[in-house]
Image (cartoon, grey):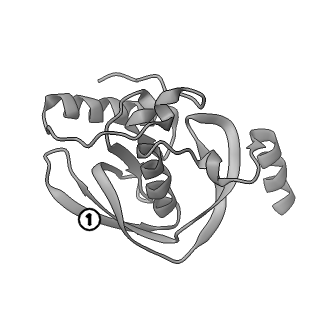
Amino acid sequence: MAIKEIVTQGDPVLNKVCHPVTKFDQKLWDLLDDMHETLAQSNGVGLAAPQIGILRRVVLVVNGEDRVIELINPTIVHTEGEQEGFEGCLSVPGKWGVVKRPMRVRVRAQDRNGEWFEEEDEELTARCFCHELDHLDGHLFSELVDRLYTSEELDAMMAEEE
């Protein structure tokens, strides 16, 4: 396993549509293991393969119980409700923006062995499903915001609310 460098905004790989995974083999398992290690080191809640320069439809999402969900060839099959809140991204370091997302999301995906399954969650995990799947189609959260805030601006706003 290896920690991979996270690609940042401006790199053209982040604007490309990823290819489906067709082989469920050691190469895929190595990619997933590298993504696990990279995500853990970054303290993020999600990571998509294009964020480490790999144009494959592979995503990791950390749910509310700190379980890392591996999603291969994922699609959103159901959404309900709405939430609005701040999002950040490992590929847009130090920037935050307010994004509207569904409150509850169900995804259908394959596991590392190619078996299909569905996973459903709400709030932060639902937000993360949407955010990470956007990466697979070449989109960043920053396309959905009216304004990007710095970490300092975000900290100041949070302090005002306390």
Q: Quadrant of residue 65?
A: bottom left
Dot 1 falls on a residue whose secondary structure is strand
Residue 91 image point, x, y percent: 56, 34
Nearer to me, 80 or 39 = 80
Residue 59 appears in the picture as rendered: yes
Image height of 14 relative to 129, above or below: above
- Count how many numbered circles sit on residues in the image: 1
**Farthest bottom residue?**
81
| Residue that mark 1 sits on | 118
Q: Quadrant of residue 75?
A: bottom left
Residue 145 image point, x, y percent: 69, 53
Quadrant of the frame with the C terminus? bottom right
Residue 162 appears in the picture as rendered: no
The amino acid beneath tag 1 is Glu
Is 55 situated left or right of 112 in this image? Answer: right
Nearer to me, 26 or 1 = 26
Q: Residue at x 30, y 39 (%)?
A: 19
Judge the density around disc 1: few (<14), some (14-19), many (≥20) Cα neighbours within 10 Å.
some
Q: Residue at x 12, y 34 (%)?
A: 25
Image height of 80 relative to 154, above or below: below
Image height of 115 relative to 77, above or below: above
Residue 38 image point, x, y percent: 42, 30
Q: Residue at x 26, y 43 (%)?
A: 20
Residue 39 image point, x, y percent: 43, 36
